[in-house]
Amino acid sequence: QVQLVESGGGLVQPGGSLSLSCAASTRLFNIYTMNWYRQAPGKQRELVAGINSGGVTNYADSVKDRFTISRDNAQNQVVLQMNSLKPEDTAVYYCNAQHSIARQINYWGQGTQVTVSS
């Protein structure tokens, strides 16, 4: 069992920045692909960004060039740096850990609210 704890959400004005962190309670952190998902009211949960154990990243088109995902395998942590935030980025953001081989094994954090509003 892997526990994921997110932090860093909050209220920010359009054009502002926020950094979300996710700490994982596992000594096997480096075998998990780490992802950030988000879910806005009335919408389906969507993949925002992911980073595999080798550091290869992928992003949703809507956040490319604005968001950056990174991981620290020594600290068992993944960070999502969000810049140039837009109102449409408002959502609950969830950290996800997916086993890199047994991909059906997934763990989720409790979510953190990000609100972009003036």
Image (spheres, helix red, strand yellow):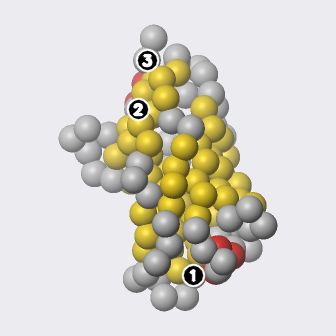
Looking at the picture, how far across and down is residue 67, in whole percent?
62, 42
Residue bearing mark 3: 117
Element carrying mark 2: loop
Q: Which residue is situated farthest in the right direction here?
A: 74
Quadrant of residue 89 in the image? top left
Residue drawn at the location 58% of the way across and 68% of the way down:
25
Q: Amino acid at mark 1?
A: Ser
Quarter in which the C terminus is drawn? top left
46 left or right, relative to 28? left
Q: Amino acid at mark 3?
A: Ser
Residue bearing mark 1: 100
Quadrant of residue 76 in the image? bottom right
Residue drawn at the location 63% of the way across and 64% of the way down:
51
Against 43, is 4 above or below? Answer: below
Q: How packed is label 3: few (under 14 Cα within 10 Å), some, or many (20 or more)?
A: some
Against 49, is 81 above or below? Answer: above
Element carrying mark 3: loop
88 left or right, relative to 27? left
Q: Amino acid at mark 2?
A: Thr
Pointer 3 with pointer 2, Cβ within 8 A: yes
Q: Which mark is residue 87?
A: none
65 left or right, relative to 92? right
Element carrying mark 1: loop
Q: How packed is label 1: few (under 14 Cα within 10 Å), some, or many (20 or more)?
A: some
Residue bearing mark 2: 90
Q: Earlier in the sequence, mark 1 or mark 3?
A: 1
Against 29, is 16 above or below? Answer: above
Pointer 1 with pointer 3, Cβ within 8 A: no
Front position in the image: 92 or 75: 75
Q: Earlier in the sequence, mark 1 or mark 2?
A: 2
Marks 3/2: CA–CA distance: 8 Å
